Image (cartoon, helix red, strand yellow):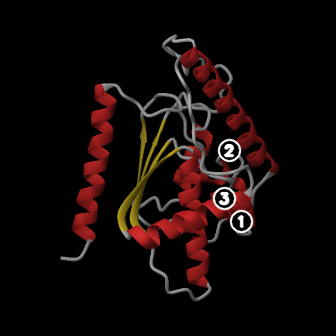
Amino acid sequence: MVMWKAYKWMEKPGVESIKKSVEWLQKYIDKNGPFDCVCCFSKSSSIVVALLLYHARDVANGSQKPLPFKSAIFINGNLECSVLEDLGLPVTKEAKEIQTKVEEMVKAKVDAMSNLASSLVKPSGLWDDTSQLLHDPEELPPPSNCFGLDFTSFPPDAFINIPTVHMYGGKDPIFTSSIQLAYLCDPKTRVMYDHQGGHDVPRTPDVVADMAAQFRKLDKQLRATGPK
């Protein structure tokens, strides 16, 4: 029998649960960091983003605590509307509805994958049916209406200004959230790459090579801007 075991970053949905995870992550970083880069997948991205956003708020209020890492890589990243609302940023009803719908789509796919794993059937083409997606992977939305979020209305200090790499899949329902996350980061220091897959880490040699190239490019950038 194949045992399917999954872990999660939040006890339950909602900003209070996210704050608890941020607190845990900050304690871990205080003990083991700082780090040059953090690499995260899916929901873990929302915790890292929340940490960065709350850190920026604390700095604006006089905190001298340095950033825990110099850069971030988000693979199929996720942005939580509840955190934006908690920080007083404008979040529309449309944005919240889209977030709920795409997360339900991903959950249904993951449940299907779990059933296939337990029956010893290799999950094949899990993300190939794109008929229900809420986005067109061939066309990115404008910042003024990014799946319900208007980033042109956000104050300048609301944006993440460390170097970031955003790897997302056109077949992934959470593509919508991944693009929102990318738009929340400084366009001068962000890299966006569509691996054209679903909500998983690609394993095909050509895509893996492209992703590795983005890692190396970020490393080169950090070395060029770091202390001599």
Of 63 and 174, nearer the camera is 63
**Residue at x 28% of width, y 64% of height:** 222
Q: Quadrant of residue 103?
A: top right
**Residue 40 location, x and y as percent?**
47, 49
Label ID, residue 18 = 3
SS for callout 2:
loop
Residue that numbered label 1 is attached to: 89
Instruction: Check the image and name the residue furthest to the left.
Output: 228
- Percent from the top left, x then y, of residue 174? 60, 38
Q: Amino acid at mark 1?
A: Leu
Q: Amino acid at mark 2?
A: Phe
Any part of residue 130 in sight: no
Residue 197 position (above or below residue 155): above
Label 2 or label 1, whichever lies nearer to me, is 1
Q: Pinpoint residue 124: horizontal percent, then vertical percent.
A: 49, 14
Question: From what the image shows, is residue 71 above or below residue 148?
Answer: below
